[in-house]
Amino acid sequence: MQKEIKIAVDAMGGDNAPYEIVKGAVESVNEQHAHVILVGQQQVIEQELKKYSYDKNNIEIVPATEVISTEESPTQAIRRKKDSSMVVGLNLVKEKKADAFVSAGSTGALLTGALFIVGRIKGVERPVLGTCLPNKKSFTFLVDSGANVDCKAKYIEQFAKMASVYVENMYHIQNPTVGLVNIGAEKEKGDALTKEAYELLEKTDLNFIGNIEPRDIPFGKADIIVCDGFLGNTILKLSEGLSMALLGIIKEEITTGYYKFAAAALKKPFHNIKKRFDADEIGGAPFLGLQSLVVKAHGSSNAKAIKNAIKQCILFAEQDIVDKIGEKI
């Protein structure tokens, strides 16, 4: 028989915990037949679960009395709050009692805890945070989107390898294209780090297409784009802000004056556009390079985002991506 996949979820992490987190777990169990372990304050979780109908065999609670807030120092919080929902959840993954962990809590604490508790795959120098950015065709997978602000060229080479394994297996894109984010398309452009990374990527067996300028990202010029975490996080936040601003401007324009009459006819197309820009459709950013998957859900995640983050974890485990990344590295 196939091994049952268990996903641990931080029930206390995020702006909308525990109600949206628990709701997302229930929806996952009802729609995806997942097995979810909710980690956190038992009485609080039990009260939320009473609101829903679900298969009681597929949701279990692992108690944790403490919660890590976003204001705390990540390293100190992980060290001091051993009974926090985040630390207990990460230890479930480390002890192989769960196949993956999802949290919408503090990004810094989660990445720190994942690195020190779950640990790296042998050969991986720095785990990397990946994010799906919507583009004109579908999406572009961005690494690093914020885990490693200071990088070496070797790290960027490994980011590209791990991302290629992830995209190929999760999204069934054969031999995905990889672009290096730079200020120009020419090989000679960029700083010392970018030039060295280019040389390393050129020698790999990846489908490396060279440098890619930020303005080309929304057009889907590459399936994967690689850069250091400082630049990647800047690209991510600019993309989020720009997409929200554009959607707001479009909505404002078509719901004023005589355009109101066209708004009803345009409702479905604009709903589809909004869906393509909706981060909740993906659920969260995978932290690749660890011995098990850890997914960072957005701090404001709703039930839909949590459900999709759990779905991502299930597929990741089914595709055995940890071992495939190990082989690639």
Image (cartoon, rainbow, N blue to C red):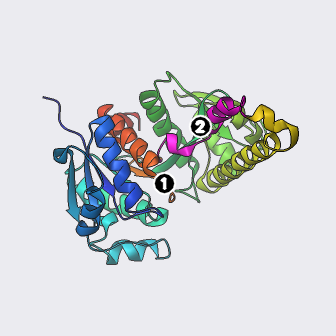
SS for dot 1 = loop
**Which residue occupies the foreground of this view, 180 or 145?**
145
Q: Where residue 98 appears, x then y in whole percent?
A: 24, 49
Residue 135 in magenta stretch: no
Q: Quadrant of residue 157?
A: top right
Residue 42: horizontal and vertical position, in percent? Answer: 23, 66
Would residue 125 be seen by someone viewing this image from the given angle? Answer: no
**Amino acid at circle 1:** Ser
Can you identify the residue that label 2 sits on? 275
Q: Nearer the viewer, residue 276 or 215?
A: 276
Residue 258 in the image: state x and y as whole percent.
Answer: 87, 38
- Judged left or right of residue 58, residue 125 is right
Q: The N terminus lies in which quarter of the figure?
A: top left
Q: Residue at x 46, y 47 (%)?
A: 305
- Residue 184 position (above or below residue 20): above
Side of 204 relative to 270 (left or right): left
Residue at 62% x, 32% y: name it: 272
Q: Nearer the viewer, residue 275 or 145?
A: 275
Q: Quadrant of the C terminus?
A: top left
Q: Residue at x 41, y 29 (%)?
A: 169
Crowd rating for badge 2 (residues with CA inside 10 Å; few <14, some 14–19, many 20+): few
- Reply above or below: 66 against 12: below
**Separation (CA) of disc 2 from disc 1:** 15 Å
> Circle 1 sits on which residue?
301
- The residue lying toward the viewer, choosing from 44 and 166, is 44
Label 1 crowd (10 A; few <14 / some 14-19 / many >=20): many
The residue positioned 43% from the left and 66% from the top of the image is 109
Q: Which residues are magenta?
A: 264-284
Query: Going by the image, does 101 lie left or right of 188?
Result: left
The location of residue 285, given as percent across then percent down, is 48, 48
Instruction: Report which quarter residue 28 is drawn in.
Output: top left
Q: Amino acid at mark 2?
A: Lys
